[in-house]
Amino acid sequence: MYTNNKLAKSIRLALMFGGASLALSGTAAAQDQSGDEEAEEAQERITVTGSRIKRTDYESSSPVQITSSEEIKNSGFTRIEDLMNSLPQVEAAQTSYIANGASGVATLDLRGVGTNRTLVLMNGRRLQSGGIYSQAPDVNQVPAALVERVEILTGGGSATYGADAVAGVVNFVMKDDFEGLEVNVGASGYQHSNGNDYMQGLMDARNFGYPTGGSGIDGKSYNIDVTMGSTFADGKGHATAYATWRQINELRQESRDYSSCALNAAGTACGGSATAPLPNTYFAPIVGGEYDLDQEVLWSLGADGTFRPYDGSNVYNYAPINHFMRPDTRYTMGAFVNYDVNDSFRPYMEISYMHDRTVAQIAESGVFFQYFEFDIDNAIFSDAQRAQLQDAFGADADTVGAYIGKRNVEGGPRQNALEHSAYRMVFGAEGYLNSNWSYDLSFQYGSTSSSTAYINDFYVDYIGSALGANGYDACTGDCIPYPVFVPNGVSAEAADGLGGVAIMNGITSQRILSGFVTGEFDASLPSSDLPMAAVFGFENREVDFERIADTIYQEGALAGQGGPTNSLAGGYNVKELFGELSVPIAEGRDGIDSMTLDLGVRFSDYSTSGNETTYKAALDYNVTADWKIRASYNRAVRAPNVAELFSASSLGLWSGEDPCAGDTPEYTAAQCANTGVPTDQYGSVGESPASQYNGIFGGNLNLQPEVADTYTIGVVGNPLDNLNFTVDYWAIDIEDVIGTLGAENTLRQCALTGDAVYCDNVVRGPGGSLWRGEDGYVIATNLNVGTENYRGIDMNVNYTVEDVLGGTITARMNGSYYLEKYTDAAGVDCAGQISTNCFPQPDWRHSLAVTYTPDDIWTAQVKWRYFGGVDYTGSTDQILLDRGIASQSYIDLVSTFEVNENTSLLVGINNVLDKEPPLVGGSLATNANTVAGFYDTLGRYIHASVTFRF
């Protein structure tokens, strides 16, 4: 048995410093062992992410990225998603930097393959869905202070863990064996020196205000974490309990000069919304009972009360009041308990609870180009305005139609109050059946209750009455008239009278009964002295999801919602049998220090889609004690989730570009005719100033599971005592992809091909518009739409130098090179690209941390985080045209001090040089003119914490 070879030693050394992508993930591997007996005892406690087999001589055949508790603490992040998004293998998904469209949860997107294809575990068991807007787990449930380490398994893990492990697995291993009492108190905030000449020049041109100079420390957050643990019953049992509190203050876009105005799609001017304080309105006469599009005009209300042709300048800067970072309050508590009755029966329990409340604030509501009809003599028009309408449409025009864009600056901003309460319970027992075999049987229940209360949005039915429009009830009683065409004529009371509240509640639950046995056979291959090992198990998983929307949500009755939000209810059950077999092939021979073949299979029976089989095969080959070659193949599946199956089709918004809009469309008249633009309207279709367009989205009961093949092959090397590295190639190929063709992609493919598969899904409204009112839209409901292909290389290096100025220097590099990121929905390879279809994942991204430890009193670390440049493949964004986004580098500093035996201090600064995020135009930004949450978003991040141990 190879119990203590040089490679295993290097792995344990790397774990001490949070080494990445290691061959082993050890619960005890970071301990300092001396002597063969102690080393063997340590190795007996090693477990491997990606397999349930437990054995004394097992090393992983799949690359596992490990982030230690030390790294988590040094990062200064109290939001676990911030830490995870800083890893080169993770793309930003739902974060606290999203306001418009916020779900209130934090989700993980491994390699940009998708949040629904990233399986998230806690202590090797699934987390339930996040809430009413999310089918992916909410990692707000995970208290950062209690995480022992985070393990990321590359490639499919469906044969071991079941569905969803297509991109890989993220496993949060918690501190369940804590001893003593620990209290951690922390505070952090952001600081930025506002001096972006480009943005300030654009705002000066529009007479917009913006901050200058230093911001002071803003976006402050505070946290208190309490952990306690002890043995009981004469050491037979152990309990760890925790409680945490975290408060994060809001930060609005007005706090940074680079976000104080909303850039237009080209990035060349402060754009904004055509729903403005002085309204912009499309007018046309009603002829023969129809809106006469041929006579349509677009007018702006002037400060003198007369109409004038819209020239693009009358737009509202909605940016300042929007949240750049949402406020958030979170409480968590929980416990881990186990008790050794005897070797055959060790019951255990895990319980956790989380309550989180956040508020997403965006600009004021208004009349968002809803359609109304008015008699020409309606009191809403002044005599001068009435004369203008008759001059434009003829003296005999007696009724006009109007698409009105009026911003509710007289009221307050729209707010979405999002609350989540999640609890999770695991009850189980484990023990030995005999000297070679053990069992684990558990029941798990997790549930998340969530709600949203959307306030201060206009209720559409009230607007028509307050305007005095045709077909609506007269404005009497408590109704206050809304004089929309009188400059500054709307009172706060009139605005308040149009407000409505929409409420939605939901609950998701997950029940899992699981059991397995694992052990070694008294059998081996003739070429090996080591026994074969196996695991056999079953799992029954039931998922239910219910979302109840009130009538206002379901009818889309609020003006600024972009369409209805329907109730949703559904669920599924899956019954599974699984097994794994580990076969040592040979060891101790010339050219073969050891070689092991790992096999796995899982049979799944879904109540929604029927039977599926997943399997894996992996080879772990130690050439010598210093060199390993590993390779794996996994067949993975992802069954459609509740929302993908059961969501009703409804109107919503998508961000991007209409290539047939504007004075100079991107496509030809013939191509735009394919999308429904008549020849006489070519060059006159209005662009959405906010880069938002209508879409029809919804589920599909006929969806089939996605099927993926994942491959990895890599080398682990230890050429020197103080140097080890890993290089792993990975590939993920997905068929029968669940998703949409993409609204913009559908539009573009229709223009380019004229194929009815695409063009039947494009419906243009009056004037060819896809955003004005609700008559124009692109249909983008869920389908099994084709293939996706992802390929890349991960590289990790750990290096240690001792006796440097009386201390030790350790260096760790974690990097990822993206070779291919192709999806049928995008239609291009998105690796190293940014466009309306491509997230700006650079080809190369890494972090390099160098730590100096002179003694047991203090340590210092400097980290370099690097994002490679990305190319821009579009033609609209002039900021990025011919240059893309340049490479970005961030420097972080952190130091720890042991004040005394019971007290330690940590202080740090991330993004020391206060580097701003790269600017992008309105059609590419996720929030505030940037790709928020991916690049460092708010400037310099300062953090400090004090830990008391008793």
Image (tube, rainbow, N blue to C red):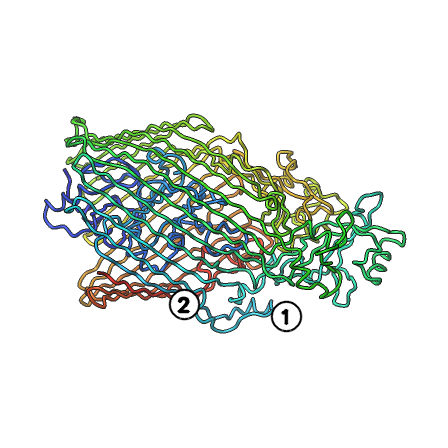
Q: Residue furthest front?
A: 477
- Rendered-image quadrant of the C terminus: bottom left
- Secondary element at image label 2: loop
Residue 728 in percent (x, y) is at: 33, 44
Please give the name of the residue rendered at 41% of the width and 63% of the height, measured from the top-left corner.
221
Numbered disc 1: secondary structure: loop
478 displayed left or right of 425? right
- Tag shown at residue 350: none
Residue 293 seen by the camera = yes
Residue linked to disc 2: 913
- Residue 853 figure quarter: bottom left
Q: Which mark is residue 207?
A: 1
Question: Closest to the observer: 325 or 706?
Answer: 325
x 56%, y 43%: residue: 549
Question: Which residue corresponds to the image point at 39% horizontal and 55% vertical from the top-left?
Answer: 79
- N-terminal label among 2 and 1: 1
Q: Position of residue 340 (x, y in %)?
A: 18, 40
Amino acid under disc 2 = Leu
